[in-house]
Amino acid sequence: MLKLSKLFRLNRNDYAKGTLVAALAAVVKLAFDSLGIPAGDEIITPIAAGIAYLIKNLFTNSSGKLFKKEEYYIDNTKDYNEN
């Protein structure tokens, strides 16, 4: 299972995800620039970072694992036929 970092601490996974968000933000900013969207860096950079964060979360499962399928567990201890 993925080990999430504790409060006010970062682990290797946090650095990897931060690098991914930074790279995606650069790609989104480059796309804005190539489309000729007229806005200053103080407008484009936060928008690009927000879009990059959403893209990262789109590919993260509910356990916090990047590019992994959802993990489903079957509870064999529960009897679903009981009323």
Image (cartoon, rainbow, N blue to C red):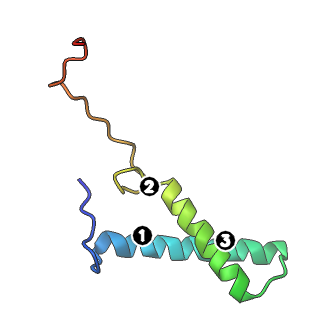
Instruction: Say whether disc 2 or disc 3 marks the residue closer to the N-terminus.
Output: 3
Secondary structure category for the residue under label 2? loop
Q: Residues within 10 Å of mark 3 (few under 14, many from 20)?
A: many
> Between 28 and 64, which is closer to the camera in this rendering?
64
Mark 2 → mark 3, Cα distance in angstroms: 19 Å
What type is the residue that disc 1 sits on?
Answer: Lys
What type is the residue that disc 2 sits on?
Answer: Thr
Q: Is residue 42 left or right of residue 24?
A: right
Residue at image coords 60%, 71%: 50
Instruction: Say whether disc 2 or disc 1 marks the residue closer to the N-terminus.
Output: 1
Percent position (x, y) of residue 25?
Answer: 60, 74
Instruction: Say whether disc 3 or disc 1 marks the residue closer to the N-terminus.
Output: 1
Are discs 2 and 1 less than 8 Å apart at CB? Answer: yes
Mark 2 → mark 1, Cα distance in angstroms: 10 Å
Are discs 3 and 1 less than 8 Å apart at CB? Answer: no
Percent position (x, y) of residue 67?
Answer: 43, 53
Q: Is residue 45 left or right of residue 66?
A: right
Q: Residues within 10 Å of mark 2 (few under 14, many from 20)?
A: some
Residue at image coords 34%, 52%: 63
Mark drawn on residue 28: 3
Q: Does residue 73 sit above or below 39 in this rendering?
A: above
Q: Residues within 10 Å of mark 1 (few under 14, many from 20)?
A: some
Give the position of the C terminus as an image quadrant. top left
The quadrant holding residue 37 is: bottom right
